[in-house]
Image: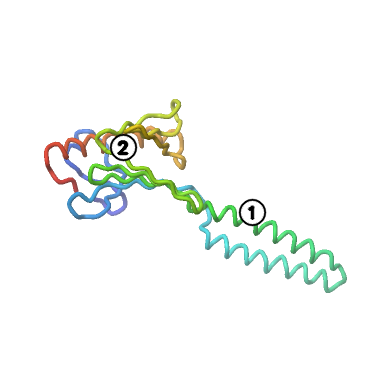
Amino acid sequence: MTSNSASLNLPGIMALGTPWRAAPLDDSPGGGLRWVMRRNCSLAPRQVLAAYFAFCLVSLSIACVFAWFGAVPVLYFAGLELLLLGAALLVYARHAADHETITLKNSTLAVEHHCGNRVERSEFRADWLRVEPAQGQGSLLELSGAGRKTFVGRYLRPEWRQMLARELRQALRVHTATAASGEVLN
């Protein structure tokens, strides 16, 4: 594994010509692979909170100066402005950490979708899983098996979803071939 990328060197992978973009779960035998796709956010929730408090300080300071000189309604409007800004930033911060995680371990592929406080989890048998575009080129990926399905790729650009599909199929092929031969997948 190189120091700046999460690529693995598994049996059969060099013949396919593409390094893994998945990170290993751990170094133990049968550790598995994990793909994490996160929302692209400029500010983390703590940074949003710090920026909001800094904005409150500046805005209330200016409003207090105006109130000192007799323009008290400016203070009310500044309070309303800060209340509305706080509500908008709260909605932003609540979804700033949204992400999807795909984990392949022990013949199971698990998909977790974190959206705000809600977590949706789906598990599939790796050897019976189908990976296909949901609608067409650039759409979300549909993972289906055993009568269940889920969609992944919400936080990827459309052109990267096909690369994820190829990589998942490749990992499933290597995993299935390795499981069939009785080897332990690192």
Mark 2: secondary structure: helix
Residue 48, label in figure: none
Tag 1 residue: 88
Question: Of residues 52 and 133, which is closer to you in this image?
Answer: 133
Q: Is residue 65 left or right of residue 134?
A: right
Tag 2 residue: 168
Question: Of residues 5 and 48, which is closer to you in this image?
Answer: 48
Q: Is residue 184 left or right of residue 49?
A: left
Eyeballing the image, is 40 above or below 59?
Answer: above
Mark 1: secondary structure: helix
Q: Amino acid at mark 1?
A: Ala
Q: Is residue 8 left or right of residue 142?
A: left
Q: Residue furthest left?
A: 182
Question: Which residue corresponds to the image point at 44% horizontal and 25% vertical from the top-left?
Answer: 136
Name the spot of residue 71 as percent of width and height, x first: 86, 67
Disc nearer the start of the sequence (2/1): 1
